Image: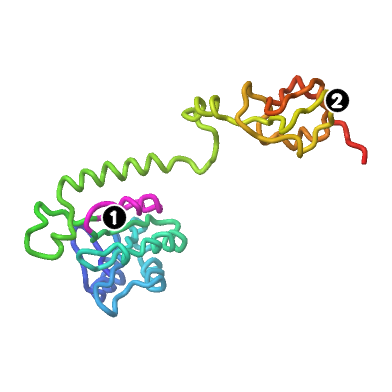
Amino acid sequence: MTLKHRGRVHRDREQISADLVLGKLESQEGISVDTQEAEADCYLSSRLAWQVYQIMKPLNPNFCFLQCISAYPLQPEDANLRVISEYQKLFPDIPIGYSGHETGIAISVATVALGATVLEHHITLDKTWKGSENLASLEPGELAELVRSVRLVEWALGSPTKQLLPCEMACNEKLGKSVVAQVKIPAGTILTLDILTVKVGEPKGYPPEDIFNLVGKMVLVTIEEDDTVLEESVQSQSKKIKA
């Protein structure tokens, strides 16, 4: 586990525990807890994460958990990004994020789509410098592209409400479907589902979701095959079909 506070990085679990118990971390400054396997016996499981959460929450509620894997560079198949979703379920009242050690920015961008609200990356001026962390770091150009990509994904997430958007109106006017006659329907016919279908029709008539409401109504004029069923072509009141 890696805990960052006021710019310092503590990698020793005993020191972190002591700081927590002694209240040294009680402040309004942000604290990030990287859930990485810094040591073989220091893997922050969900149980340990819950214990840390219970200790830290009363001392300083301004903290977050970051999914992190201590490999340099991290291979995509080891990222385990689903941990982010699990932490969101376990700790809905704190930010959940990601600390990336992979090459490139694709995985970090993907975490934003999963709901990560905090991203951390090592930055280097030259990946060819000595040290495995340089290889797993972002150069300035990559950092700028990461920021642009994250903002784009944030905009693209949009709303959970599915609805017809203004940008879709032109396409809907051109390709939106209507209820049409599947066969020629003579005037006086009582409508049933087997003689109706849904296609792109011109002019527009009843929307697809109204097809069931048309069942049992009588057509007032003959409707040719593939012609749109228009409101003025159908009686306004339902008429039940006698068995």
Residue at image location 82% in from the left, 30% down from the top: 217
Colour theme: rainbow
Please name the amino acid that badge 2 sits on.
Gly
Give SS at disc 2.
loop
Instruction: Rate crowding at label 1 as few (under 14), some (14 to 19) or many (20 or more) other CA atoms within 10 Å.
Output: some
Residue at image location 41% in from the left, 69% down from the top: 50
The residue that disc 2 covers is 188
Q: Magenta stretch: give its range.
A: 103-120
Which percent across, then down, holds residue 165? 50, 31
- Foreground of the two, 187 or 144: 187
Disc on the earlier residue, 2 or 1: 1
Instruction: Place residue 121 in its image quadrant.
Output: bottom left
Quadrant location, the C terminus: top right
Residue at image location 18% in from the left, 60% down from the top: 136
Which mark is nearer the camera, 2 or 1? Answer: 2
The single residue placed furthest to the right in the displayed view is: 243
Quadrant location, the N terminus: bottom left
Residue 45 numbered tag: none
Please name the amino acid that badge 1 sits on.
Gly
Which percent across, then down, holds residue 88? 43, 59
Give SS at disc 1.
loop
Along the horizontal axis of the image, is 41 left or right of 202? left
- For residue 242, say whether it is visible: yes
The residue that disc 1 covers is 30
